């Protein structure tokens, strides 16, 4: 299993830093959005788009590209940042987030945004959509992989577990799901709203290969994906322990910024923490 060398790790961390800057600036420009959950998922999305996934901004519909499903569609600013940094559209366009006529909607829209494989936003559906994509690859004897990122609050949705049963039954070993386990959802702590633990044993009982990682450690993220690639006969889930609002001290672990953008003064503080400019 290939190791992530220190230079490459630093490069990926630098890309993640830039994406975090894009998140706080674009949501501030929009005056709305979901910075907290976008920041928690940034390292996972960075590892996928810049180290693991086969994709080509010059051929957006390339048949053998790996597929990505952002089930927690409200974290679109993180995905848009990765797509812009990859070259799917100009970085400057990020500042049009949520504006009238923009290609960057509040949730991913495959009809408008280059590089989006599926429109998402209705929570709980991502695993099922990813299952369909993975089954299509299996039936067509295609080698592409399918990745999905879900929120931990989504684990309270019954459709997640229907998809989990289906994927295991179909032996979709080329499907990998990340659970962004930041412990917070819109109404409070996940364990206060509806407890989802024990999450590891639940996924194991559905027949999945399960890993638990630090979702902000780039080496652990990449290693876990490579481990999933070696699994045969069953799908993989990676439970990534993260911090809501990661990288911006006043947003970290704060429910307040689940669905609220930084104001002018907060933007300055956030950019100072991230090493960015206004």
Image (cartoon, rainbow, N blue to C red):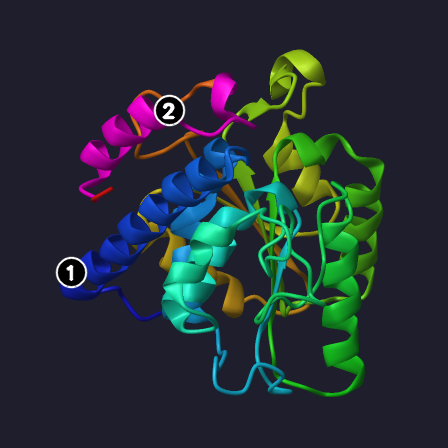
Q: Quadrant of the C terminus?
A: top left
As helix, strand or loop, the secondary structure at mark 2 comes to loop
As helix, strand or loop, the secondary structure at mark 1 comes to helix
Question: Does 107 appear above or below 91?
Answer: above
Residue at 70 percent of width and 35 percent of height: 155
Q: CA distance from mark 1 to mark 2?
A: 26 Å
Q: Quadrant of the N terminus?
A: bottom left
> Is residue 216 visible from the viewing direction of this image?
yes
Residue 82 is left or right of residue 152, and the answer is: left
Q: Earlier in the sequence, mark 1 or mark 2?
A: 1
Residue at 41 percent of width and 73 percent of height: 87
Quarter holding residue 135: bottom right
Would residue 47 be counted in the magenta stretch?
Answer: no
Residue 264 is left or right of residue 189, and the answer is: left
First to last magenta residue range: 255-276
Residue at 27 percent of width and 59 percent of height: 12
The front one of 194 and 2 is: 194
Residue 61 is left or right of residue 3, and the answer is: right
Count the marks: how many?
2
Quarter holding residue 250: top left
Mark 1 and 2 residues: CB-CB less than 8 Å, in contact?
no
Mark 1 vs mark 2: in front: 2
Question: Does 9 appear above or below 269?
Answer: below
Residue that numbered label 1 is attached to: 6
Position in image of residue 111 (x %, y %):
72, 68
The secondary structure that dominates the magenta segment is helix
Position in image of residue 41 (x %, y %):
47, 44
Residue that numbered label 2 is attached to: 252
Residue at the top extreme?
A: 192
Position in image of residue 6 (x %, y %):
15, 60
The front one of 248 and 188 is: 248
């Amino acid at each position: 299993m290939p190791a992530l060398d220190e230079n490459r790790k630093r490069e990926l961390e630098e890309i993640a830093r830039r994406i975090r800057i894009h998140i706080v600036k674009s949501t501030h420009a929009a005056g709305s959005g979901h910075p907290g959950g976008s920041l928690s998922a940034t390292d996972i999305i960075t590892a996928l788009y810049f180290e693991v996934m086969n994709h080509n901004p010059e051929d957006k519909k390339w048949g053998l590209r790996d597929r990505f499903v952002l089930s927690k569609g409200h974290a679109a600013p993180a995905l848009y940042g990765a797509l812009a940094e990859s070259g799917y559209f100009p970085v400057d366009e990020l500042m049009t987030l949520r504006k009238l006529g923009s290609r960057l909607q509040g949730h991913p829209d495959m009809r408008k945004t280059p590089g989006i494989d599926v429109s998402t936003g209705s929570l709980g559906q991502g695993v099922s959509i990813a299952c369909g994509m993975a089954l299509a690859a299996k039936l067509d004897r295609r080698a592409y992989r399918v990745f999905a990122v879900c929120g931990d609050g989504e684990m309270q949705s019954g459709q997640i577990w229907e998809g989990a049963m289906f994927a295991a039954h179909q032996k979709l070993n080329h499907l990998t799901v990340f659970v962004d386990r930041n412990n917070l959802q819109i109404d409070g702590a996940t364990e206060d709203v509806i407890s989802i633990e024990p999450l590891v044993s639940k996924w194991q009982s559905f027949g999945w290969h399960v890993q638990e990682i630090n979702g902000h450690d780039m080496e652990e993220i990449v290693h876990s994906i490579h481990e999933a690639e070696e699994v045969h006969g069953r799908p993989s889930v990676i439970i990534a322990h993260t911090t809501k609002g990661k990288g911006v001290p006043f947003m970290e672990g704060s429910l307040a910024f689940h669905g609220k953008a930084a104001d002018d003064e907060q933007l300055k503080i956030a950019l100072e923490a991230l090493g960015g400019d206004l």
